[in-house]
Image (spheres, rainbow, N blue to C red):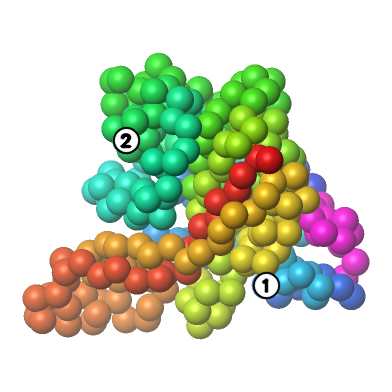
Amino acid sequence: MAKKYRYITKECLFCNSTNEADHPIVYQKNFRDEDLDAGVFSARRTADHFHYDMVRCSKTGLLFSRHILDDEALNELYKGSVVTFGEQTEFIKRDYWRPIADKVGGWQRKRALDIGCSNGFFMEVLKDNGYEEVHGVEPGTEPKAIARADIRDNIYTGFYGPGLYPENHFDLITCFQTLDHLSDPLGMLRNMLYNTKPGGHVYMIMHNTNALQAKIFGERSPIIDVEHIYLFNKENLSELCRKAGFKVTSVFDVKNGYPMSYWVRMSPLPMKKMWVGTLKVLGMYEKMLDINAGNMGIILEKV
């Protein structure tokens, strides 16, 4: 029997409506229920280019999926997701740490939380850079099993939400490529505010819909994906964070550095075999390339 899921309708985070005149369809749904499995919901896989009906708010530029799988289905799919980026881990650590490396010296470093922590790679970075107590939340069951021994017991397998941690508990909460996966990002931000100490910080990285690659590739961009429910730019992300109660201290482009082999594999370029062959002939296939690939970072403060 073909797999069937329940769907729910999402509203604009700012207009609180799905009025079609103000939220026209940009990309039409292009998958069947039976196309979906846990592999489709695993981070940094080669994109399948599956997506829901996606609409754009004419007032704020917010791009979002109108009819999405219900929470029960999403939870089940994410629980079965696996770690697919092992060989890139050291590059990701470096890229995510660089934007705050010169800031944490002036921050309290007692407790930190990483939401959507995968195998705890950034928990390792935080612990290795002076945070006394690091915690993580990850829905997939595999990542905790392969986490570094000294942080494994502090990874909660499940979903971040109310009641998981006390009020005013963390000096720093980090969240990478996760907010745009959520059906209620404003609710999550408000819960992060509750868990952050006064004077504490939240640091997030996510895709930017105004980035050059998103504009060039359009529907073929890796960010147009069934995992992504709400997609932001710098302006509407800042507005949402302020709506949640945070002070926005900085919003910035994030550079990513990977070998050329990774960039070619992940990109929607045509004739990939030709590109691979050419780069190998030129001796550039494993050459490192640092570029602004379309990610943005934001640092928030609880005042």
Residue sitting at x 53%, y 74%: 211
Q: Are marks 2 and 1 in contact (CB under 8 Å)?
A: no
- Give the labeled residue for mark 2: 129
Horizontal side of residue 267 vs 17, given as left or right? left
Three-letter amino acid code of the residue under disc 1: Tyr
Horizontal side of residue 78 vs 257, given as left or right? right
Three-letter amino acid code of the residue under disc 2: Asn
Residue 190 visible somewhere in the drawing: yes
Horizontal side of residue 176 vs 277, given as left or right? right
Secondary structure category for the residue under label 1: strand
Residue sitting at x 25%, y 47%: 90
The quarter of the picture where the N terminus appears is: top right
x then y, percent, for residue 148: 29, 26
Question: Foreground mark, 2 or 1?
Answer: 2
* Label 2 crowd bin: few (<14), some (14–19), many (20+), radius 10 Å: some
- Give the labeled residue for mark 1: 27
Our reading of the magenta stretch's main secondary structure is: loop
